[in-house]
Amino acid sequence: MSQIEIRLPKMGESVTEATITNWLKSVGDKVEMDEPLVEVATDKVDNELPSEAEGTLVQILFDKDQVAQVGDVIAIISTNGAAPIPAADSSQSAPQEAAKVMETVAAVIQEVAGDTAVDKNGPSGKFYSPLVRSIANKEGISMTELESIPGSGQNGRVTKKDILAYVENRGSQPVAPPNTTSAPEEKQAPVAAPKAESHEATIKIKAPFVPSMPGDEIIEMDRMRKMISEHMVMSKHVSPHVTSFVEADVTNIWNWRNKIKDEFKKREGENFTFTPIFIEAVAKAIKDFPNINICVDGDKIVKRKNINIGMATALPSGNLIVPVIKQADRFNLVGLAKSVNELANNARDNKLKPEDIQGGTYTITNVGTFGNVMGTPIINQPQVAILALGAIRKVPAVIETDNGDFIGIRYKMFLSHSYDHRVVDGALGGMFVKRVADYLENFDQSQKI
């Protein structure tokens, strides 16, 4: 009887694990080739994984909400019809069964122990997954002890692998408790943890106590909102933010778009927004000031070769995601318009691939979509700058001519440029956003599209 192992595939450069969020098939169900089999969530994006074989699903090796590593066997499909559940493989099934037992025991301990359960956020602000907290409770690992475990996950997060390795060596190898008066343990963390964390302040920041009040509604953050929250806090902690503002006259752009948008919609079957024009101007300015297109690796500066511009996109759920246009400087306006529309639509329909949101070197966010005049955006790490685009407003302005000045009606907007003051000084940050404004103001409204 032929059986096919379905493994968790690689889903991007930095993605090493994924959480099983939903099985679309049950044991005993028939499965077609390329039919959606399971939904998984990574720290980048949610995905449906198609079946790699046709047959009957005979075993599911990871339950909902369990974390699987890339390459793990997550299911088995029989190509010869229904089959008995295969015997446990000591190299794979045993650890998985052990993990299930640990979760069950941890649940009981949590019910009995009550307030002794490990919190999901430690004093240092680290987030601990339900599985890690379950193992910690089962093994009697205190929060102080848990904080001392170096994490190999994103942003130094402790993974199942980290805590199991710690448990295995716990008896034979004493681990010093975290020192709250000296530099934190991230100095000894694996390479996967951001090196900038080695320069953290020694003060532990603790979230305030929030008392309940009559009529309050408690809403649990969804997985994506938790990741956004962690990423934003990390960015403000790592980078000293500075913001420069410039007002740009975009009357030429406003008039030109109104002139070509109907023809473009008729010819291409899609809308032409202002976004591709903004991206083109940013890409040109980055070529003029390449030291904006960098990132910080410890005490080294990495200058990026490609100009990959991310565009923050609001999702129907209220969350935010940043799809990336790779090598944006190589596109003309038509190519940028099509890329912008495709990525935005895929983001709203939850059809983005992991590679669609990776590799960004600079980000823009359009706060004007919500009627905001300007904003102070938070840098999308590990980048060093981000540009917020304000609302385009019709305002009175002084117009200079050879025959004197007069007041006229113009279309204007504010550009807000936040940058990492560790490596981008005010002169560079200010000149860059002024250059973007110059490209927008000098837009050629006679060009064809």
Image (cartoon, rainbow, N blue to C red):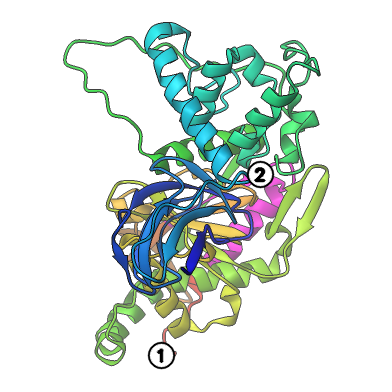
Task: Please check the rendered image and state whether residue 343 is part of the magenta-colored stretch, yes or no.
Answer: no
**Does dot 1 land on a helix, a strand or a loop?**
loop
Report the side of 10 relative to 333 (left or right): right
Residue 381 in view, yes or no: yes
Which region shows up in magenta?
414-439
Mark 2 closeness class: few <14, some 14–19, many ≥20 residues within 10 Å: many
In this rendering, is residue 35 above or below 142? below
Residue 388 in view, yes or no: no
Task: Please check the rendered image and state whether residue 426 is part of the magenta-colored stretch, yes or no.
Answer: yes
| Residue designated by label 1 | 449
In this rendering, is residue 383 above or below 4? above
Sequence order check: which comes first, mark 1 or mark 2? 2
- Amino acid type assigned to the residue bearing label 1 in the image: Ile
Mark 1 closeness class: few <14, some 14–19, many ≥20 residues within 10 Å: few
**Could you say which is closer to the camera, residue 359 or residue 6?**
6
Whole-percent x, y for residue 205 in the image: 58, 18
Report the side of 9 relative to 214 (left or right): right
Residue ranking furthest to the left = 215
**Could you say which is closer to the camera, residue 283 or residue 139?**
139
Q: How many marks?
A: 2
Q: Quadrant of residue 177?
A: top right
In this rendering, is residue 243 above or below 139? below
Residue visible at 41% across and 40% down in the picture = 65
**Does dot 2 land on a helix, a strand or a loop?**
strand
Whole-percent x, y for residue 256 in the image: 35, 81
**Could you say which is closer to the camera, residue 369 or residue 37?**
37
Q: CA distance from mark 1 to mark 2?
A: 36 Å
Residue visible at 39% across and 55% down in the picture = 84
Whole-percent x, y for residue 262 in the image: 24, 85
- Amino acid type assigned to the residue bearing label 2 in the image: Asp
In this rendering, is residue 361 above or below 134? below
| Residue designated by label 2 | 420
